Image: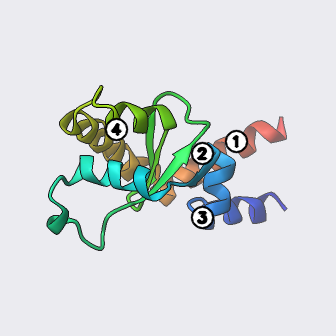
Amino acid sequence: MTAAIGVTRVIGRNTRPMLWWRFGATPANAFQRDTMLTAIVPIASLRGRHQPSVWIGRRIIGGQVVMPSSTALVVSPEFVGQVANGRLTDRQASAIISQALGAAEVVDSTLDTCSRLTACRGSWLR
């Protein structure tokens, strides 16, 4: 039973229901998406197919931006507001998002996820 739950969590960890469950995330509207993508790549003609999907997260712990995978960007509504109002420049926003992307390479790894599940499973058995 525990193994089945673990496998399901590894396979579905970056799906729409899991993003909602983990971060309270909903898809960004067009304005929010364009604001974030402009901060990452200011020149519209350079934006391509490999841009991340943008989500608005209500429960981001420890910051305002997280990338659970290299294809999903979860930002807080406050972060979008700061970028849209000019309190954060595109360069500052891009630096923050880049740091989140760097962490995503470790956090998104299946090995990391499995090791965390194994550690949790051990605590359940005690």
The circle on residue 15 is 3
Left or right position of 93 against 1: left
The residue that disc 1 covers is 120
- Residue drawn 56% across the image and 60% down it: 14
The circle on residue 59 is none
Which quarter of the rendering shows the C terminus? Answer: top right
Q: Kindly check if marks 2 and 1 are in contact, taking CB atoms under 8 A apart as contact.
A: yes
Disc 2 and disc 1: Cα gap in Å? 6 Å
Q: Position of residue 30 (x, y in %)?
A: 44, 59
- Residue drawn 55% across the image and 52% down it: 113
In this rendering, which labeled residue sits more in front, label 1 or label 3? 3
Q: Is residue 91 above or below residue 39?
A: above
Left or right position of 13 against 66: right
Q: Is residue 93 above or below residue 113?
A: above
- Disc 3: CA contacts within 10 A as few (<14), some (14-19) or many (>=20): few
- Residue drawn 36% across the image and 42% down it: 100
The residue that disc 2 covers is 116
Which quarter of the rendering shows the N terminus? Answer: bottom right
Observer-nearest of 31 and 9: 31
Secondary structure beneath disc 1? helix
Left or right position of 126 against 78: right
Observer-nearest of 22 and 83: 83
